Image (cartoon, rainbow, N blue to C red):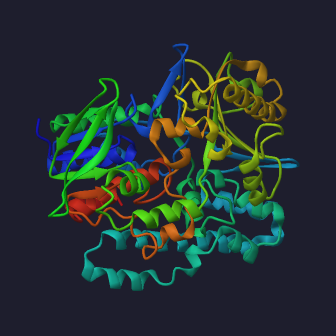
Amino acid sequence: MKYDVIVIGSGIGGLCIASLLAQEAKKKVLILERHWQLGGFTHTFKRKRKYEWDVGVHYIGGVGEGEQLRRVYDKITLGKLKWQKMPNPYDVFDYPDMSFAVPDGAKPFMEKLVSTFPQEEKAIRKYFKDLKRAMKWYQLNEAIKGAPLPFKPFLKLMQGSSQFALQTLHQYLDNHFQDVKLKAILASQWGDYGLPPKLVPFVMHAILVLHYINGAYYPVGGAAKIAEYALDPIHKAGGEALTNAEVKEILFDEKKKRAVGVRVYHTRKKEEEKFYAPLIISNAGAYITYTQLIPNNMHPWQQAILDFVQRNPTTGHISVYLGLKDSPEKLGIQGENHWIYQQYNHNEAFEKQKRWTGDTPPAVVYASFPSLKNPEAEAHTAELITFATWETFEKWKDLPWRKRGSDYETLKEKMTKQMVQVVDRKFPGFSKLIDYQETSTPLSTHTMTAHYKGTIYGLPAVPERFDLSKSPWCAPKTPFKGLYLTGTDVAGLGVSGALMGGVETAIALLGPRPSLLRLL
């Protein structure tokens, strides 16, 4: 069968660009997915025929009626995806001697901070203005990536200096606030971008805070509905999606420096096959695309990207998936997320987690309750997440999934016990609700996604990632004809960041047509 487009990877960025090309340009798209399930970090899995968990979608902002991201999700799913509003508050930050519940809305959030820390009122009000200032810089930064060459200087002039946006969050907080607890509260969602205040730029923090500023939502029926509905327009245009199809190489006409196809290994059939199309779009991430899929003699950025990932920290995670005998509402939980910290210093917490081996309580545990967010859930569940490094598990990296031996399982069990105990201390009786448990590590993430060192996100969100002069690979256009990038490394972190990577790639390919600009 002939295809107009081949998309590598079925994560939300790949699904978004495939759906948009099918709808906007009637393109016949082939999606190739190495995993046995479609959806990337939007896929779900079940155990005991009733317990179901999401692997990457824990809550999503910006999808209220009329909001920007709602328009994008509606577009790619033909309006079929429905959203369940999470409780207000949707996030609670739990510290040893205080908790702070985040209310919906910028004004309620700001007023609650002011009432809690009245001595910092002036700085708090300025902080909310600065979030918008940094967001404007980011929006112009993304516009510059896809703008025609004559417009780039004008947009850069509008954007202004990058110094404010790319200062670290730690620098911003120290320059504007005095209270240690206030600084900690403002940075409490750092796990959503995977880096502590000393490493992440203020602009990344601003994107995250404003993403959730009007509250949070969860897809009705679970995160897997995103892929299910996004595939409908792709199929209608004659496209298809293949699982267990690992792309090993992008094929080129080397004389023309043009991508012409891909070499695929079918993991179930254990055979190779080549597919050809005039347009190849990689949703595998910049690191995998430029260092593994493009022949070594062809691309200019291989060593630069290798240097980038080696000098910057990666963020791996441990997820504990719990099936519960009864509703966590009995413990006073209404469906909100809890970030449970052992201390106020997030930089120290990050460093502790790099060395954590389960002998002590983890510095942070994020607790999510999917069954209370999804009105169609069959049974009650919880998911606990903390951060860990690849190096902690590296000795087992060459062993197959679920066959990594007793020492690996013992370490996981020790870590799981500590994480459950943290939540049990916050909500006495929680551990008695557990009927089933399963734990994943950075090795699991690497097995499913091939991400460098099993990182939960794409390229780390350090300041230079947002500087196009230093990271030119974080853009939809590549140095090769017929090859484009999409997904999280094009736009931003997380599921919705990867989604917008799909939109940016569509605009780069099809131009700024009104139907696409309405999605911005």
On the image, the x and y values in percent for residue 464 come to 52, 71
Classify 373 as above or below 283: above
Please tell me whether residue 115 is drawn above or below residue 389 in the rendered image: below
Q: Position of residue 64 (x, y in %)?
A: 47, 48
Is there any visible trace of residue 66 in the rendered image? no
Which residue, as the protein is rendered here, is positioned at the far front?
297
Q: Quadrant of the C terminus?
A: bottom left
Q: Residue at x 55, y 42 (%)?
A: 59
Apparent side of residue 209 relative to residue 21 in the rendered image (left or right): right
- Is 406 left, or right, of 10 in this rendering? right
Is 16 placed above or below 326 here?
below
Q: Residue 79's quadrant in the figure? A: top left
Q: Residue furthest right?
A: 97
Closest to the observer: 297 or 509? 297
Q: Nearer the viewer, residue 88 or 324?
A: 324
Residue 238 at x, y = what percent? Answer: 15, 36
| Nearest the eye: 372 or 325 | 325
Above or below, 216 against 178 in this view is above
Residue farthest toward the top in the current orientation of the protein = 48
Q: Residue at x 21, y 64 (%)?
A: 511
Residue at x 46%, y 34% (from the top left corner):
223
| Residue at image location 14% in from the left, 42% down from the top | 3
Image quadrant in which the N terminus is located: top left
In the rendered image, is residue 397 in sight?
A: yes
